[in-house]
Amino acid sequence: MAPEKTVRVYDDAPPRTHEDVLVQSHAHDHGHSHAHGIGHSHGGHSHGAGAGQSRLAIVLAMSAVYLVAEVVGGLMTHSLALLADAGHMLSDVASLVLAIIAMRFAQRPPTTQRTFGYQRAEILAALANGAALVAASVWIVVEAIERLHTPAEIAGLPMMGIATGGLVVNLIAMAVLHGGRDASLNMRGAWLHVASDALGSIGAIAAGFAVWKFGATWADPTVSVVIALLVAFSSWRLLRETVDVLMESAPAHVDVAAVRAALGALPDVRAVHDLHVWSIGSGTVALAGHLQVAATTTYGAQSTLLSAACALLRDRFHIEHTTIQVEPEGFDQAVRCDALMADQPQ
């Protein structure tokens, strides 16, 4: 008769610190349970969402009010630059509404189907904002080229006055959003929308002056093209970063090679493999990996190693959402799992 095999699950080990969760079941906000040499550590996920929503709501109200003024002014003065700026303002209003909705969704707790919650909602909103800015830039360029061929009569002085009002509104909005623009890609997308509007207002003021002082009607579409190119350039970076998150690329500020080397330099670690680093949402970096140790390494040494690994990732690389598996040399996960399942009573 084959000797009886024992599966060791250290559920009775006394908990020590939040990071020291090796081979023991533990409860936390997400309700996970881990065993067999796997450690799981979570950092906080609060990103000042309430303050961000308040900022967005203030800017939304300001933008909506001035949008009406710019549309009326653009139609009255026949200014493409003003209408282009109003188009930006319209996309601002839409993007701000989208950003607020996305932030509310991102605060929803995880479910059994959406185990990471709705943090990616903000990334999707940022992607939509970036795409909208690029589309608006293309429309402005097309309209400007047509306007160069068929110049329109433009009232320069009223155009300058309306654009100046728009610039004041945009500068106030930029100041309101400035404190939260680095908190998430969603907030940065909203800030970029407002910043592009500020550029549009400056361009409209300059074009209005050229038309009023020198009768240079070509200045209006020319300035519009320059602004559109600047907006498209800034939007491209936002789009690239959002796509990187959706493709689960390693965040730009995390040197994966340095992470691998630092983990490999920890005591008792023979190798590091299956190392993955990605962003769940803005500001939330996750890591999963396997640390290989000698087959004779004791449970106590593994526990110490896991604590050291979690502390290293948190303190040096600012990665707090980690899942680390410590395994002995020669460990074949597929074979070992099959063997464990075969030992279970039918």
Image: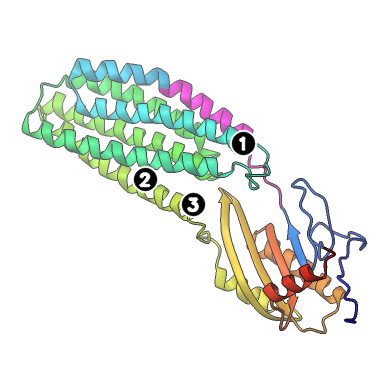
Label 3 vs label 1: CA separation? 21 Å
Q: Which residues are magenta?
A: 43-63
The amino acid type found where label 3 is placed reads Leu
Q: Using a 10 Å C-alpha cutoff, classify the residue at mark 1 as few (fewer than 14 neighbours), some (14 to 19) or many (20 or more).
A: some
**Mark 2 vs 3: CB contact within 8 A:** no
**SS class, disc 1:** helix
- Residue type beneath disc 2: Ser
Magenta-colored stretch includes residue 54: yes
Q: Is residue 2 above or below residue 87?
A: below
Residue 235's tag is 2
- Residue tagged by mark 1? 49
72 relative to 229, above or below: above
Q: Main secondary structure of the magenta part?
A: helix
What percent of the width, then of the height, locates residue 246? 49, 52
- Which residue is more in the foreground, 19 or 229? 19
Along the line of sight, the residue nearer the viewer: 217 or 55: 55
Give me the disc on residue 259.
none
**Residue at the spot x=34%, y=17% of the render?**
68
Q: Amino acid at mark 1?
A: Ala
Across and down, in percent, residue 277 comes to 58, 62
The dot on residue 246 is 3
